[in-house]
Image: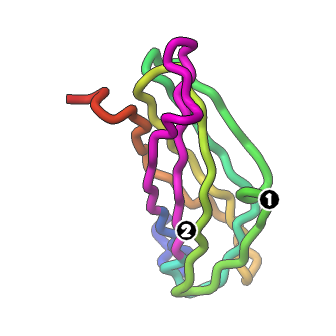
Amino acid sequence: MSDSRYQIDVSVVTRYLKEQSDPDNERFAFAYTITVQNSGTVAAKLMSRHWLITNGDGEVEEVRGSGVVGQQPLIEPGQSHTYSSGAVISTRVGAMHGSYQMFAEDGKRFDAPIAPFRLAVPGALH
């Protein structure tokens, strides 16, 4: 979005969950912590999410839902909201990307893109 009033920045940190994974049965669990920063000038509520989760074989799972982890946070300008969640894929490496659907305090609806990020078992990539 080019309108700086509605600028949402998303940063992600991922972690492989060895204790919840079962490689022999093609189950690889990952946690991710996301920070949603309102860099704009208008408060905005995170209404819903849309994810595309792609495994190493190119298979895509689409996920849509209300808010994030049961919340629809209102994020004031200069403030952020951080939460953790997880994903399970059937390969050692995968990726996620998507968007948040936002509702600004002034009535504008807009999407905040989530750039692709990698899910990878440590040592899976050289």
Which one is in front, 22 or 35?
Answer: 22
Task: Tell me where the magenta segment starts and ends, as one range.
Answer: 11-37
Which one is in front, 53 or 26?
Answer: 26
- Above or below, 98 against 34 in this view is above
Which image quadrant is residue 21 in? Answer: top right
Rounded to the nearest angstrom, the CA distance separating label 2 from label 1 is 15 Å
Residue displayed at 60% across by 73% down: 81
Q: Determine if the magenta segment contains residue 29.
A: yes
Type of amino acid at the residue the image marks with label 2: Val
Compare marks 2 and 1 and give the one earlier in the sequence.
Answer: 2
- Above or below, 123 against 69 in this view is above
Return the residue at label 1.
70
Residue 53 place in picture, x, y as percent: 56, 33
Describe residue 60's horizontal placement relative to residue 12 as left or right.
Answer: right
Describe residue 73's horizontal placement relative to residue 42 as left or right.
Answer: right
Residue 83 place in picture, x, y as percent: 61, 63
- Above or below, 86 against 73 in this view is above
Q: Determine if the magenta segment contains residue 28.
A: yes
Return the residue at label 2.
36
Type of amino acid at the residue the image marks with label 1: Gly
Residue displayed at 55% across by 22% down: 22
Residue displayed at 59% across by 31% down: 88
Q: Residues within 10 Å of mark 2 (few under 14, many from 20)?
A: many
Describe residue 74's horizontal placement relative to residue 1 as left or right.
Answer: right
Which one is in front, 36 or 21?
Answer: 21
Per the image, label 2 sits on a secondary structure element best described as strand
Residue 49 place in picture, x, y as percent: 68, 51
Per the image, label 1 sits on a secondary structure element best described as loop
Rendered-image quadrant of the C terminus: top left
